[in-house]
Image: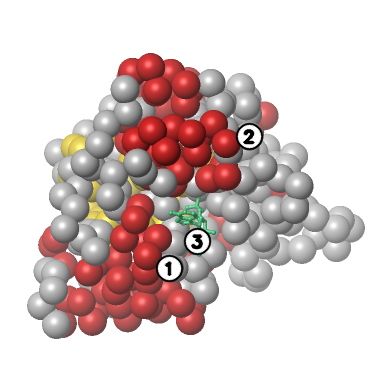
Amino acid sequence: MAKVPSVEFSNGRKIPVFGLGTWKSKPGEVTQAVKDAIDAGYRHIDCAHYYENEAEVGAAIREKIDSGVVKREELFITSKLWSTFLRPDLVEPTLKLSLKNLGLDYLDLYLIHWPCALKEGGAFLPKRPDHDVLSEFSDVDYIDTWKVMEQVAKKGLTKSIGVSNFNKRQLERILEIAEIPPVNNQIECHPYLNQKKLIAFCKSKGITVTAYSPLGSPDRPWAKPTDPILTEDHKIKALAAKYKKSSAQVILRYLIQSGVIVIPKSVNKKRIAENIQIFDFELSADDMAVMDTFDCNGRVCWFVEAVGHPHYPFNDEY
Ligand code: A2P
């Protein structure tokens, strides 16, 4: 079974550098996927309230704990606070709902999913009556959310706290007021959007980075048939042939060697097993440099419903 290394957070706790993504995993498929992943050696599962499948993820986790395959303390479970719950009084009940769905009494990491608060109390993407795409915004500032994130960490509901989709300026604002600094920023990161500058900034502040959509999320609901598919890129395929690995393995290995944590999503037993087999080879410095050349601002997750939000993260360079 593959041995996955861990990296240390600024608070001394550790996170496995490889985990299973569950965004887009359907409730009917994800229980089996998480069971297959744990059997294949995965110990880190990335979840979110927004994915609407935490109960099904939790069923797999509970089964693997109850049957003695893993202990709770050997697992690293992340969840995220969705944008319609950023108002301070909603943080603790929303975290507790994720705990209930997952069947856990603590999380390892809880993240603010996006810096943009949306109107509370309704749909996850509350429709604006006057617009086809945009959601209704809330004026909650994520700074006020962060103060309660610190409280839920102090209560032990989560071992560590962090953010997701935050840009440099937004991280600086948090760091200015934080009593407990964020240990992690989870951002879109793959060869078409390698995030060198934001990763370097995070590193300089002791913030680890998790790469979401490491394979470019070809199953994103808004993908167009003409969009390039990262794992089909012929230059990456050529490197894969050289290393006798798959394109996905080369991409994931590139990200690991770039110093980020990866959480590829799969609901396919064969690909789940394939994706973790990346700790038995190393890309040369020259081939890392080749992989670096694919960067093309190829962001796929734009959160178009929040464009124009005062805290929309993607207007800054990084
Ligand atoms: P599937 O779930 O059927 O395996 P990302 O993690 O970037 O969001 O990418 C997830 C997408 O990539 C899913 O469509 C998933 O399909 C697919 N995928 C996962 N692992 C591999 C792999 N090893 N090779 C090709 N596609 C993969």
Which residue lies at the image location 20% right of the left edge and 48% below the top edge? Answer: 4
Q: Earlier in the sequence, mark 3 or mark 1?
A: 3
Asked whether the beta carbons under mark 3 and mark 1 sit within 8 Å of each other, the answer is: no
Q: Give the x, y percent position of residue 191.
A: 51, 33
The image quarter in which residue 75 lies: bottom left
On residue 315, the disc is none
Please give left or right for residue 173 compared with residue 193 in the image.
left
Along the line of sight, the residue nearer the viewer: 271 or 17: 271
Q: Which quadrant would the N terminus be assigned to in this image? A: bottom left
Q: Is mark 3 within 8 Å of ligand 1?
A: yes
On residue 268, the disc is 1
Which residue lies at the image location 42% right of the left edge and 52% below the top edge? Answer: 264
Disc 3 residue type (three-letter): Trp
Q: Is mark 1 within 8 Å of ligand 1?
A: yes
Residue 179 seen from this side = no
Which residue lies at the image location 19% right of the left edge and 53% below the top edge? Answer: 2
Residue picked out by circle 2: 298
Q: Give the x, y percent position of residue 171.
A: 45, 30
Along the line of sight, the residue nearer the viewer: 123 or 236: 236
Which one is closest to the eye, mark 1 or mark 2? 1
Residue picked out by circle 3: 23
Which one is closest to the eye, mark 3 or mark 1? 1
Which residue lies at the image location 85% right of the left edge and 63% below the top edge? Answer: 129
